[in-house]
Image: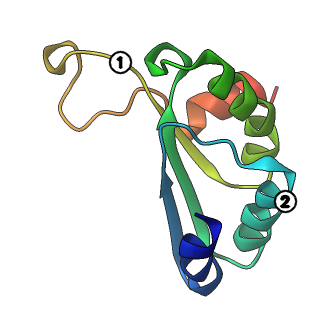
Amino acid sequence: MRDHINPYLKNGKRELILISPYFVPGDRSVKALIDKVERGIDVEVITNSYLSNNHSVVHAAYSRYREALLAGGAKLYEVKRSSRKERPEDSVALTTRALKAAYLR
């Protein structure tokens, strides 16, 4: 899989948007994503929140990297499970601001 996405990760000039319900970056990927932010590339990750993830072990592994990504300037969005009528139009469950407030005190 890495061979298929590496060209996209390496060649981005302005933004990198990663969407994965099972996002677990690892130390090397966290460093690479923060390096991109430091070079002026907007890095955004959209993944599942704990309550919308059916694999708590995967979410626990991801959560170990959350603070470093936020501190490094990446934008994280965690989507929660909800019905359409429970939320306003065009809303996201947890924004980067909410995550930073929770994890970067």
Q: Residue at x 55, y 37 (%)?
A: 22
Q: Which numbered disc, 1 or 2, marks the residue that appears first in the sequence?
A: 2
Residue 101 marker: none
Along the viewing direction, whichever of 76 and 100 lies nearer the viewer = 76
Taking the spot 21% from the left edge, 25% from the top edge, the residue there is 88
Which residue is at a point 23% across and 38% down the rendered structure image? 90
84, above or below 44, in the image: above
Q: Where residue 91 sits in the image (x, y, percent)?
A: 30, 33
Q: Which residue is mark 2?
A: 28
Amino acid identity at mark 1: Arg
* Residue 31 in the image, given as x and y percentages of width and height: 84, 61
Kindly identify the residue that appears in the image at 48 percent across and 29 percent down: 94
* Residue situated in front as seen by the camera: 23 or 75: 23
Residue at numbered disc 1: 81
> What's the residue type where badge 2 is placed?
Arg
Question: The N terminus is located in which quarter?
Answer: bottom right
Q: Nearer the viewer, residue 45 or 91?
A: 45
Callout 1 secondary element? loop
Tell me the CA gap for discs 1 and 2: 30 Å
